[in-house]
Image: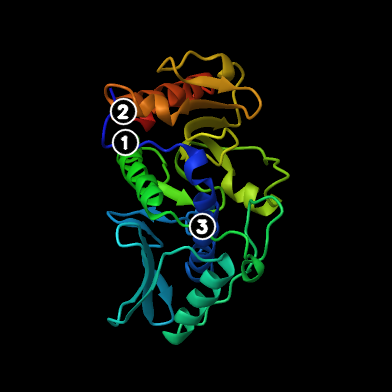
Amino acid sequence: MENPGWPPLPYADWQDSCATLHTWTQIVGKVRLALAPPVNHWWHVPLYVTARGLTTSPMPYRDLTVQIDFDFIDHVLRIDTCDGRRDSMPLVPRAVAEFYAELMARLQALGLEVRIRPVPAEIADPIPFDQDRIHAAYDPERLNRFWHALAQIDQVFAAFRGHFIGKVSPVHFFWGSFDLAVTRFSGRRAPPPSNPNIPDAVNREAYSHEVSSAGFWPGNGGFGEAAFYSYAYPQPPGFGDAKIRPSAGYYDKNIGEFILPYEAVRRSADPSATLLEFLQSTYAAAADLAKWGRSALER
């Protein structure tokens, strides 16, 4: 039986809109990267789920505070400053180059001089923002469904986060990889990681400490369908052979992560409980095999 609160998300139906939104979120995310003070593990760069879409959260600019919000109900991008000024631009089918030019112009009109590196991150064969006239799709209905799914998942991730009293990340949306994620830390340092797709300095900061991390891809994670994932870094011996729940979850040897299809969660009798079971069982496998001090870290 399907739960109406968890909408269907067949990736083939909205992959063009997904690619466009991915790039738009990179532009807005890079504004946050330029303005926000650094925080460990790059926690100053993601976006966050709201009751209407995604937000940068408040960002400092000289003696002002500014915030940029994607609204997937009214399909508007809003810019707010703490002195009461507001500007907005419609979210409609348009090329990335046009979106980029208009957003930068509107920020400048508000007196916000922001410079960003105008090239997408973590995307194969990236096209500079000001040259990208290929990605221009925007399907409001399907993007609203995507946000509804994010809102449901955000609640479950937040509940999972609350069970941990050790160091744990916020639930945040990484615009580089276009996924919602939450990460628990053992407290121990980790060896330097290696990922040819991500600059070494970025990787070293992200994975400076031992983690168990879980998240959600809407379909762009290489599987062609929406899915949840869970991994450990560094991965302890035997992790891929661990017994996890629910039975629809499996270990993908190609990427070294546990995967649970979104559709299996959506169609379950209790999607939130099913997802929480996946998060908890994969974390337990990582923590037990790596001998985390669980009694001191869990509520």
Q: Nearer the viewer, mark 3 or mark 2?
A: 3
**Of marks 3 and 2, which one's residue comes earlier in the chain?**
3
Residue 275 visible to an observer of this rendering: no
- The local secondary structure at tag 3 comes to loop
- The local secondary structure at tag 1 comes to loop
Residue 170 vs 20, above or below: the answer is above
Q: Report the amino acid beneath label 2.
A: Pro
Query: What mark, if any, has residue 6 been given in the picture?
Result: 1
Q: Quadrant of the C terminus?
A: top left
Residue corresponding to mark 3: 137
Q: Quadrant of residue 132?
A: bottom right
Front-most of residues 195 and 28: 28
Give the image location of residue 87, x and y in percent.
36, 78
Residue corresponding to mark 2: 271
Q: Residues within 10 Å of mark 3 (few under 14, many from 20)?
A: some
Residue 147 visible to an observer of this rendering: yes
Q: Residues within 10 Å of mark 1 (few under 14, many from 20)?
A: many
Say whether marks 1 and 2 touch (CB < 8 Å): yes
Front-most of residues 100 and 134: 134
Image-based side of 212 in relation to 54, left or right = right
Q: Report the amino acid beneath label 3.
A: Ala
